[in-house]
Amino acid sequence: MKVSLLLSPNGVNLEHWKSSDKPNKNSAFYKELKGRNSHNLPVIGYHGALAKWIDYDLLKKISKTGDYFLLIIGQQYDDSLKKSGLLSSQNVFYAGPVDYDFLPQAAQAYDISIIPFEQSELSNCVSPIKLFEYMALGKPIVSTETSEVLKYRSCLVSQTHDGFIKKLEYALQLKNELWYRKILNEEARCNSWNARAKQLLAFLKEEQFKV
């Protein structure tokens, strides 16, 4: 018997992530961020799990440039963040876990969003939901190379640390480019949960007629 399969990766709730275009800059979160980022450096943002698959050496190298402020949001699943020594840097703010309802508002602080995964078999097998959340936010995306991010035009991808930092420079230039923002919006729409549901329904309908 022949079996058909549909690979449906993660997606994004567009309404949730487009709900905070004008964040409350008077919130405790933004006040602390402003106090820590006293030199008003461009904010490089990451939210998600913090574990051994994060390339902390890359994050430390970004921090050491002195050109960026790292905002890290998420749950620690092991002691890799603590052991990395990253938090000793002055231009790094680890905000800890943030409630999902507030996360889109917090992430509006990003100038650039990043996926700093170690290149490994594990990272090549994941569909990071943050990728689609970043698209919905309309923030430039810079990532280490994985199989998933190579599928999308909005992702600026690098295999090396120095290349990654170069991509950050380019991402700042793209931040307000209309053509790039259109790519982000289109890829977010195509990877929404609504789009995933329509794809699944179309697949099931097609399979039904094959029977």
Image (cartoon, rainbow, N blue to C red):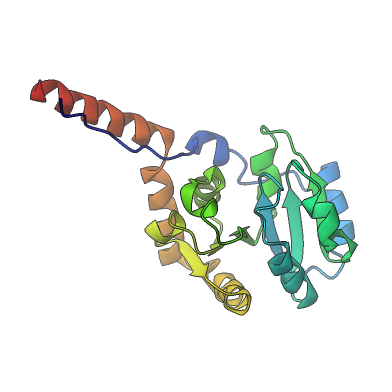
In the rendered view, tell whether residue 206 sits above or below residue 104.
above
Q: Nearer the viewer, residue 167 or 119?
A: 119
Q: Quadrant of the C terminus?
A: top left
Q: Nearer the viewer, residue 211 or 36?
A: 211
Q: Residue furthest left?
A: 210
Q: Residue furthest front?
A: 1
> Is 91 situated left or right of 19 in this image?
right
Q: Nearer the viewer, residue 32 or 58?
A: 58
Tell me which corner region of the image, top left, top right, bottom left or bottom right, holds residue 2: top left
> Is 135 situated left or right of 165 in this image?
left
At a point 52% along the width and 50% down the height, the residue shown is 131
At a point 50% along the width and 67% down the height, the residue shown is 157
At a point 67% along the width and 61% down the height, the residue shown is 55
Across and down, in percent, residue 56 comes to 73, 62
Q: Is residue 145 visible?
A: yes
In the rendered view, tell whether residue 187 sits above or below residue 210.
below
> Is 61 situated left or right of 1 in this image?
right
Q: How many marks do you count on the picture? A: 0
In the rendered view, tell whether residue 4 sits above or below residue 23.
above
Q: Is residue 66 visible?
A: no
Q: Quadrant of the N terminus?
A: top left
Across and down, in percent, residue 128 comes to 53, 46
> Is 77 situated left or right of 161 in this image?
right
At a point 15% along the width and 21% down the height, the residue shown is 208
Across and down, in percent, residue 70 comes to 75, 62
In the rendered view, tell whether residue 18 sits above or below residue 110.
above
Across and down, in percent, residue 207 comes to 16, 26
